[in-house]
Amino acid sequence: MLTRTAVDDMTTIRDAKELNSVILSARGLHKTFGGQVVLRNVNFNLRKGEVVLLQGENGSGKTTLLNILTGNLEPDVGELHLSVNSTQEVFRWPRRWWQNLNPFDHFTPERIAWEGVGRVWQDIRLFSTMTVLDNVVLSSPRQAGENPIIALLRLGRVNKEELYNQEQASKWLNGLGLGDRLHSSCDKISLGQMKRVAIARAVQAGAKILFLDEPLSGLDGIGVAEVMRYLDTLVHTNGLTVVIVEHVFNIPRVLDLATTVWTLADGHLTVESKDKVWRNPKITTVFNPYDWLKEVAGPGGKVETQELKQGARLTSAIPSGTENAPVVLEVKDLVVRRGYRTVLDGLSLKLHRGQLTLLEAPNGWGKSTLLDIITDVLPLQSGNIILNGESINSLSTDKRVRRGLGYLRSRKPVFGSLTISEHKRLPEGSNFIFSGHSQDGDTKANLLSGGQRQKLLIEMLPDASVYLLDEPFIGLDAGSIPLLLKELSRLIAEGKAIMVVMPES
Amino acid sequence: MNYLLHLLIYLDIYLIVAMSLNLLIGYGGLLQVAHAAYYGIGAYAAALIMLKLGWGFLPAIGLAMVVAGILSLAVSIPAWRFRGDYFVMVSLAVQSVAYSLLYNWIDLTNGPFGLTGIPRPSIFGYKFDSMRTIALFSSIITGICILGMVLILRSPWGRLLKAMRDDELAARSLGKNTRLVKLQTFMIASALAAVAGSLYAAYVSYIDPTSFTLDESILMLSMVIVGGTGNIRGPLVGAFILIAIPEALRFVQIPDAVAANVRLMVYGLLLIIMAHFRPQGLAGTYRIQ
Amino acid sequence: MQILLNGIIQGLLLALVGLGFALVYNATGIFHVAQGVIYAGAPFILLACIQSGLGWPVGVFISLMFAASISCLYEVGNHWPLQKKEASKEIHLIASLGAYIALVQLIAIIWGNETRVLRSGVDTTFSFSGIILTHSQLLGGAIALVVFAAFLFWLWRTDIGLRLRALADNPIQLSLMGYDIRLLRLAVFGLSGLLTAVAAFLMALDIGFDPHSGLQMILLAMVATIIGGRGSFLGPILGAILLGILRSQIGWFTSARWEEAVTFFLLVLFLFFRPQGIFGRAGRLEAQT
């Protein structure tokens, strides 16, 4: 019987042998992307039965680390030791050139999956043309019927195996409460159900270590409880080891189950026990946006909060004198569907002259999608967008920009092959100035660091009546943030409307 | 009556081509334009084996399938690495190389002069010489091919193929070896194309490289895309339309000199229309993403 | 040395087509297979102008304008609507293949399938130190070089050239700065049409032309673009010259049948070992899965 108590250094009462067996360890993982170091000397030992919370800011390298550990990406330097089954597999980088000649020795997702590592994707990725049952049956490993020759010639044997697999999968899904949904197509089940099917699928495929990428994003309270309960069962009844990547908002739910916390910051990974983290929660944002909002509202002004669907929050700083300011940008009844998922369901909001609005929402909510649709980077499916009193639904991006819409996209989309001076030649006049670039004007933008690109992009924002900024503070150094805050406050005072989008804090 | 049998034989040949290409495109999500090359390789291989080695028809088809299957590695290995449209261009290059070899390797293929006197199919001494027996023979072969295809598409392998088409990365993270699946799919499709080619060679008794150009590949692509991808019915519709259009054109009395051009032009237009308005084809279920 | 010069001049003409192809590819990510229609059709227009007594300068001008306009119309009719529907690159490619087939057949229906010539009689030749070059070859090489110099100057020194490079790099960001992407794309297609037509005239002058010569050139242009590297404009030019030299060397030392194989192997070599091409940026390589 497995029991669990919360003690300081993780010596819970379990099978002592199992506790100590390390099933996955990493040594000196290092990864650089285009000049930026994303992972720096990452080391860890993952033991059987652990539940790890992997946390870190957006852009801290969580996804990169996840991709490496699931075989989707190779690090530049480092080692991985896998001992899930009784054999030990070691992968070392940099790889010798002759290692790639052997097609059986490549570092691929399927190879890692064979070693017992499974992954649940942030966007779920169920096979959309198959039923729920088929998604799980498909994952059964070592099916004879997956060899076309056997499928053709040994029909009897294949059918028998298939029947058995279907029974197993049905039992499994029944246990999840999806018994009546076995033959539905995947777009007819709820998001929470989809996530659990995705987990079941990975476990059916033989995963002993499961990496989950933001599994709780987009779920309501019921959905979160279902998923966490399922994971709990898998850990304690089936002996699964779990690593959960999650963003700040959902961390408390995960911490209930977690035993260990990995924190990624600046490329470094820190490993701590859960209790230590619980007692000393880290401040994960560099500045407190609410202080800034209060400052912008000023004496006599106010700060108003509005809760939106699915865990998002809209907070506006309304300086005195702007309470009845005209609406600059309005979004009415916006509905967005990506594939078979409804991302935004009837969203409406208004931005007023001279007011600062902060939109906070969990990852996966659709923040960037919202901004993309307002600016026609993505096409409008249903709803209305009104800029300065006129509907701009039918206008293309450049026309919307010329009517006074400014947009700073996230993920630092500079023109990589153009130099800094060439960047500055492009816009027809801009409002922002960061004094003194450390790089000279002839440097190509793809050699700049993340923060430098961010500054360049901000400087290129055209003159507009409303600015939409998607995570503008990411990657900026501590010195530049107050500068940006000052510039934005100045623009507010001049009567612009600004909406800043951030992940929740 | 003979004319109808002639049409039936062509229908059989195109059915096999359509089903095999649909396996690649509709079920595997592997868009490519080198199918005519494997059709041609099958035709030339079977013809040469029967002419030069004197083998019977069934062994000749068998060997032609093996040759085409092995040569399918030229497209299946690039398919491991390259995304959609890049892969189509690679397949275009493969088609060009194949045609160039058929045309220029005169010692082996007789180049532009082609191969004549290809014998009609004979099995254990029985020769299928009349229109009726040939039509019967080709229909039986086609029936076997279709049956085989249906069986493997309904098997776990077929399901794995569809999963790979829907989301290859997700399939790989479940431990599925999609590279192997691609190899298998191309081998099967190329082998089937070779069967069609062999039937064609044995029926018309004379083949030359001009029947196996890129135009022909695009025609085959049209047939599958217009008819419909992702199910069994689509290729049937596609092959049928391919047979029907020249007949319809003859009806409208297009002069013979431009008939071939008009037919191709119609196909090009159909391809454009389908791409814009109905990527799943007339009778298909899978929209090309 | 003769072979080398032949190869270089072939390469220069190929580079004109390659640049036209790369322009569209860099700006839109589309493989512009239908560019082969412009290549095939432009000399016919020129011939028609000459034959109706308009004289060479006027004829060339009209044909160039025609080529540019058809190219723009093609973008408006085929690719822009698909872009708005967020169609995948495969769908664009299918539509492009369909357009290529349909329009080439149209050319063949109007003017017939045979090869034509732009000038009657034998070309004048120039010889020095044992090397013989025809008038067309010299003219072709010279014009190509002038065009490249002008184009590269325009690309790097003018504002419009800057916008074109920005378009190739990040079209969304460019539109967020208030620039009209539609107009820029039209300009790109128009320019591509012009370059292709120039190359077609020069080749036609040298060896004649027929409706089906386009695809070969496009395939080579595509390989040159991939060798040169995505996002680069100088790269495809150099890649094409390299291709021209290699093909003529192989053609001379072995035989014509292996020239296509060279193209294919070079393509696969680069895609496997250096997918970003010679000048492309190593980054996320979209060619790979």
Image (cartoon, rainbow, N blue to C red):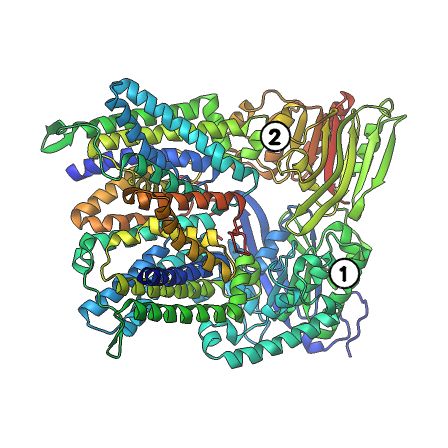
Q: Chain of mark 2?
A: A
| Quarter of the figure with the N terminus of chain A | bottom right
Q: Chain of mark 1?
A: A
The 10 Å Cα crowd at callout 1, few under 14, some 14 to 19, many 20 or more, is: many
> Do marks 2 and 1 share a chain?
yes
Q: Is residue B93 visible?
A: no
> In this image, A232 relative to B50: left or right?
right
Q: Callout 1: helix, strand or loop?
A: helix
Residue situated in front as seen by the camera: A435 or C64: C64
Residue identified by numbered label 1: A274
| Quarter of the figure with the C terminus of chain A | top right
Residue situated in front as seen by the camera: B88 or B22: B22
Tell me what residue is drawn at x 75 percent, y 24 percent.
A389
Instruction: Indicate the amino acid at tag 1.
Output: Lys
In the rendered image, residue B262, in percent from the top left (x then y), is placed at 35, 43
Tell me what residue is drawn at x 9 percent, y 33 percent.
C130
Closer to us: mark 2 or mark 1? Answer: 2
> In this image, A343 relative to A298: left or right?
left
Instruction: Indicate the amino acid at tag 2.
Output: Ser
C93 above or below A54?
A: above
Q: Is residue C81 visible?
A: yes
Tell me what residue is drawn at x 45 percent, y 62 percent.
B182
The 10 Å Cα crowd at callout 2, few under 14, some 14 to 19, many 20 or more, is: some
Tell me what residue is drawn at x 54 percent, y 70 percent.
B156
Residue situated in front as seen by the camera: A317 or A175: A175
- Tell me, for residue A396, which label it has, or none: 2
